[in-house]
Amino acid sequence: MANKRRKGTEPARVAEILKRLEAAYPQAKCALSHRDAWQLLVATILSAQCTDVRVNKVTPDLFRKYPTVKDLASVRQEVLEQDIRTTGFFRNKSKSVIGAATKLLSDFAGRVPKTMPELLTLPGVARKTANVVLGTAFGIAAGVVVDTHVHRIARRLDLTRHDTPEKIEQELMQLLPEDRWIDFSHRVIWHGRQVCAARRPNCPACSLNDLCYAKDKWPRKK
Ligand code: SF4
Protein backbone atom coordinates (compact mmCIF):
# COMPACT_ATOMS: atom_id res chain seq x y z
CA MET A 1 0.00 0.00 0.00
CA ALA A 2 1.36 3.40 -0.93
CA ASN A 3 2.37 5.65 1.99
CA LYS A 4 -0.10 8.42 2.59
CA ARG A 5 1.65 11.76 2.61
CA ARG A 6 1.44 13.71 5.82
CA LYS A 7 -0.18 17.11 5.79
CA GLY A 8 3.00 19.17 5.42
CA THR A 9 4.11 17.38 2.29
CA GLU A 10 0.90 17.28 0.26
CA PRO A 11 1.73 18.14 -3.36
CA ALA A 12 -0.67 21.09 -3.54
CA ARG A 13 0.84 22.65 -0.41
CA VAL A 14 4.40 22.11 -1.62
CA ALA A 15 3.51 23.62 -5.00
CA GLU A 16 1.99 26.66 -3.31
CA ILE A 17 5.10 27.15 -1.16
CA LEU A 18 7.28 26.99 -4.28
CA LYS A 19 5.03 29.46 -6.08
CA ARG A 20 5.13 31.97 -3.25
CA LEU A 21 8.88 31.69 -2.78
CA GLU A 22 9.32 32.32 -6.49
CA ALA A 23 7.04 35.36 -6.34
CA ALA A 24 8.84 36.74 -3.27
CA TYR A 25 12.42 36.10 -4.44
CA PRO A 26 12.38 35.76 -8.23
CA GLN A 27 16.06 36.73 -8.61
CA ALA A 28 17.49 34.91 -5.62
CA LYS A 29 20.97 33.61 -6.27
CA CYS A 30 24.12 32.59 -4.46
CA ALA A 31 25.44 35.53 -2.41
CA LEU A 32 29.09 34.42 -2.51
CA SER A 33 31.12 36.54 -4.96
CA HIS A 34 32.99 34.42 -7.49
CA ARG A 35 34.17 34.41 -11.08
CA ASP A 36 34.30 30.68 -11.72
CA ALA A 37 33.72 27.28 -10.16
CA TRP A 38 37.10 27.25 -8.42
CA GLN A 39 36.53 30.59 -6.72
CA LEU A 40 33.05 29.46 -5.69
CA LEU A 41 34.44 26.23 -4.26
CA VAL A 42 36.98 28.15 -2.16
CA ALA A 43 34.38 30.73 -1.08
CA THR A 44 31.99 27.97 -0.03
CA ILE A 45 34.69 26.23 2.02
CA LEU A 46 35.40 29.57 3.72
CA SER A 47 31.70 30.20 4.37
CA ALA A 48 31.35 27.39 6.93
CA GLN A 49 30.29 28.99 10.25
CA CYS A 50 30.82 32.41 8.69
CA THR A 51 28.62 34.95 6.90
CA ASP A 52 28.75 35.38 3.13
CA VAL A 53 29.36 39.11 3.70
CA ARG A 54 32.51 38.34 5.66
CA VAL A 55 33.71 35.82 3.06
CA ASN A 56 33.11 38.37 0.28
CA LYS A 57 35.41 40.79 2.12
CA VAL A 58 38.22 38.25 2.16
CA THR A 59 38.04 36.60 -1.25
CA PRO A 60 38.88 39.55 -3.56
CA ASP A 61 42.31 40.00 -1.92
CA LEU A 62 42.74 36.24 -1.66
CA PHE A 63 42.24 35.67 -5.40
CA ARG A 64 44.41 38.67 -6.26
CA LYS A 65 47.20 37.16 -4.21
CA TYR A 66 46.60 33.56 -5.42
CA PRO A 67 44.98 33.81 -8.86
CA THR A 68 45.32 30.13 -9.86
CA VAL A 69 44.63 26.69 -8.40
CA LYS A 70 48.38 26.11 -8.50
CA ASP A 71 49.01 29.18 -6.36
CA LEU A 72 46.70 27.89 -3.63
CA ALA A 73 48.15 24.37 -3.88
CA SER A 74 51.64 25.66 -3.18
CA VAL A 75 51.05 28.26 -0.45
CA ARG A 76 52.26 27.34 3.03
CA GLN A 77 49.40 26.61 5.39
CA GLU A 78 50.57 29.12 8.04
CA VAL A 79 50.58 31.85 5.41
CA LEU A 80 47.11 31.03 4.11
CA GLU A 81 45.79 30.87 7.67
CA GLN A 82 46.62 34.56 8.09
CA ASP A 83 44.99 35.46 4.76
CA ILE A 84 41.66 33.86 5.76
CA ARG A 85 41.87 34.33 9.51
CA THR A 86 38.78 36.54 9.79
CA THR A 87 36.50 33.82 8.38
CA GLY A 88 37.06 31.69 11.51
CA PHE A 89 38.16 28.05 11.77
CA PHE A 90 41.09 29.16 9.64
CA ARG A 91 43.32 26.16 10.34
CA ASN A 92 40.84 23.62 9.03
CA LYS A 93 39.76 25.86 6.20
CA SER A 94 43.37 26.46 5.08
CA LYS A 95 44.01 22.73 5.12
CA SER A 96 40.85 22.12 3.07
CA VAL A 97 41.62 24.81 0.48
CA ILE A 98 45.21 23.65 -0.01
CA GLY A 99 44.08 20.01 -0.04
CA ALA A 100 41.34 20.70 -2.59
CA ALA A 101 43.72 22.65 -4.83
CA THR A 102 46.32 19.87 -4.62
CA LYS A 103 43.73 17.20 -5.46
CA LEU A 104 42.38 19.21 -8.40
CA LEU A 105 45.89 19.37 -9.83
CA SER A 106 46.69 15.70 -9.24
CA ASP A 107 43.36 14.13 -10.28
CA PHE A 108 41.36 16.60 -12.35
CA ALA A 109 43.86 18.51 -14.51
CA GLY A 110 43.35 21.56 -12.29
CA ARG A 111 39.63 21.84 -13.07
CA VAL A 112 36.68 21.58 -10.74
CA PRO A 113 34.88 18.30 -11.54
CA LYS A 114 31.19 18.35 -12.42
CA THR A 115 29.90 15.30 -10.59
CA MET A 116 28.93 14.76 -6.97
CA PRO A 117 31.12 11.64 -6.44
CA GLU A 118 34.19 13.42 -7.82
CA LEU A 119 33.60 16.57 -5.80
CA LEU A 120 33.22 14.51 -2.64
CA THR A 121 36.78 13.25 -3.07
CA LEU A 122 38.12 16.77 -2.45
CA PRO A 123 39.28 17.52 1.11
CA GLY A 124 36.81 19.72 3.00
CA VAL A 125 34.01 19.12 0.51
CA ALA A 126 30.77 17.52 1.71
CA ARG A 127 27.40 17.43 -0.03
CA LYS A 128 26.43 21.00 0.83
CA THR A 129 29.54 22.50 -0.74
CA ALA A 130 29.32 20.13 -3.72
CA ASN A 131 25.66 21.08 -4.27
CA VAL A 132 26.50 24.80 -4.13
CA VAL A 133 29.23 24.39 -6.74
CA LEU A 134 27.24 22.08 -9.03
CA GLY A 135 24.06 24.14 -8.84
CA THR A 136 25.47 27.65 -9.03
CA ALA A 137 28.62 27.24 -11.12
CA PHE A 138 27.38 24.55 -13.51
CA GLY A 139 23.57 24.61 -13.26
CA ILE A 140 23.59 20.90 -12.37
CA ALA A 141 20.89 19.76 -9.93
CA ALA A 142 22.54 16.83 -8.18
CA GLY A 143 20.84 17.52 -4.86
CA VAL A 144 19.45 20.26 -2.65
CA VAL A 145 21.71 22.64 -0.71
CA VAL A 146 20.87 22.26 2.98
CA ASP A 147 22.54 25.04 4.92
CA THR A 148 21.42 26.42 8.26
CA HIS A 149 18.55 28.45 6.69
CA VAL A 150 17.21 25.55 4.61
CA HIS A 151 17.53 23.25 7.61
CA ARG A 152 15.53 25.59 9.86
CA ILE A 153 12.89 26.70 7.37
CA ALA A 154 12.20 23.28 5.86
CA ARG A 155 11.40 22.14 9.39
CA ARG A 156 9.32 25.22 10.25
CA LEU A 157 7.31 24.67 7.07
CA ASP A 158 6.97 20.97 7.95
CA LEU A 159 8.54 19.91 4.66
CA THR A 160 10.67 17.63 6.77
CA ARG A 161 10.81 16.38 10.33
CA HIS A 162 14.36 15.11 10.03
CA ASP A 163 17.17 16.85 11.85
CA THR A 164 20.32 16.03 9.90
CA PRO A 165 21.27 17.81 6.65
CA GLU A 166 21.70 14.46 4.87
CA LYS A 167 18.19 13.23 5.70
CA ILE A 168 16.61 16.63 5.11
CA GLU A 169 18.23 16.75 1.68
CA GLN A 170 16.97 13.28 0.82
CA GLU A 171 13.44 14.21 1.86
CA LEU A 172 13.50 17.49 -0.10
CA MET A 173 14.78 15.62 -3.16
CA GLN A 174 11.75 13.33 -2.91
CA LEU A 175 9.37 16.19 -2.38
CA LEU A 176 10.49 18.84 -4.87
CA PRO A 177 10.56 18.61 -8.65
CA GLU A 178 14.18 18.21 -9.76
CA ASP A 179 14.10 21.39 -11.83
CA ARG A 180 13.37 23.38 -8.66
CA TRP A 181 16.14 21.98 -6.49
CA ILE A 182 18.62 24.76 -7.20
CA ASP A 183 16.23 27.73 -7.00
CA PHE A 184 14.45 26.38 -3.94
CA SER A 185 17.60 26.63 -1.82
CA HIS A 186 18.53 30.09 -3.11
CA ARG A 187 15.04 31.36 -2.31
CA VAL A 188 14.80 29.74 1.09
CA ILE A 189 18.21 31.14 2.04
CA TRP A 190 17.01 34.63 1.08
CA HIS A 191 13.80 34.05 3.00
CA GLY A 192 15.87 33.08 6.03
CA ARG A 193 18.00 36.19 5.78
CA GLN A 194 15.18 38.64 5.14
CA VAL A 195 12.12 37.25 6.95
CA CYS A 196 12.34 33.87 8.64
CA ALA A 197 15.29 34.58 10.92
CA ALA A 198 16.40 31.98 13.45
CA ARG A 199 15.67 33.96 16.60
CA ARG A 200 12.82 36.28 15.69
CA PRO A 201 11.09 35.41 12.42
CA ASN A 202 9.08 38.28 10.97
CA CYS A 203 5.91 36.19 10.64
CA PRO A 204 3.47 39.09 10.17
CA ALA A 205 5.39 40.10 7.03
CA CYS A 206 5.82 36.55 5.70
CA SER A 207 4.18 35.59 2.41
CA LEU A 208 3.99 31.97 3.62
CA ASN A 209 2.19 32.91 6.82
CA ASP A 210 -1.14 31.20 6.17
CA LEU A 211 0.64 27.99 5.11
CA CYS A 212 2.91 27.88 8.14
CA TYR A 213 2.11 26.26 11.48
CA ALA A 214 5.58 26.31 12.99
CA LYS A 215 5.76 26.12 16.77
CA ASP A 216 7.69 29.41 16.93
CA LYS A 217 5.43 31.27 14.52
CA TRP A 218 3.91 34.40 16.07
CA PRO A 219 1.51 35.85 16.99
CA ARG A 220 -0.14 32.58 17.97
CA LYS A 221 -3.79 32.10 17.14
CA LYS A 222 -6.00 32.29 20.25
S1 SF4 B 1 5.28 32.36 9.18
FE1 SF4 B 1 7.08 32.84 10.43
S2 SF4 B 1 8.00 30.86 10.96
FE2 SF4 B 1 6.58 30.51 9.24
S3 SF4 B 1 7.88 30.65 7.41
FE3 SF4 B 1 7.00 32.68 7.77
S4 SF4 B 1 8.52 33.79 9.00
FE4 SF4 B 1 9.02 31.59 9.09
Image: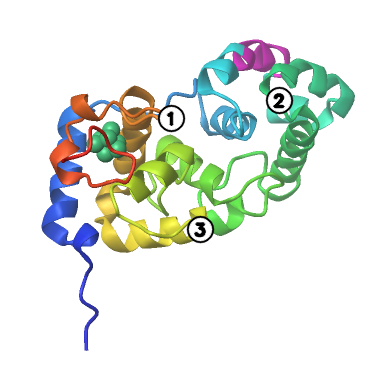
Cα distance between the residues tagged 2 and 3: 24 Å
What residue is shown at x 20% (from left), y 76% (from top)? 4
Residue under pointer 3: 166
Mark nearer the viewer, 1 or 3: 1
Cα distance between the residues tagged 1 and 3: 24 Å
Residue 164's label in the rendered image is none
What residue is shown at x 52% (from left), y 46% (from top)? 128
Cα distance between the residues tagged 1 and 2: 22 Å
Left or right, 174 with reference to 116: left
Comes first in the chain, label 1 or label 2 = 2
Majority secondary structure of the magenta segment? Answer: helix
Residue type at tag 2: Gly
For residue 155, above or below residue 82:
below
Picture quadrant of residue 159: bottom left
Comes first in the chain, label 1 or label 3 = 3
Residue 88's label in the rendered image is 2
Picture quadrant of residue 73: top right
Residue type at tag 1: Arg
Which quadrant is home to the C terminus? top left
Q: Residue furthest bottom?
A: 1
Q: Residue furthest front?
A: 222
| Disc 1 crowd, CA 10 A, few/some/many (<14, 14-19, 20+) | few
Left or right, 102 with reference to 156: right
Residue under pointer 1: 199
| Extent of the magenta region | 58-66
| Disc 3 crowd, CA 10 A, few/some/many (<14, 14-19, 20+) | some
Front-lying residue, 74 or 180: 180
| Disc 2 crowd, CA 10 A, few/some/many (<14, 14-19, 20+) | some
Mark nearer the viewer, 1 or 2: 1
**Is 52 part of what is drawn in magenta?**
no
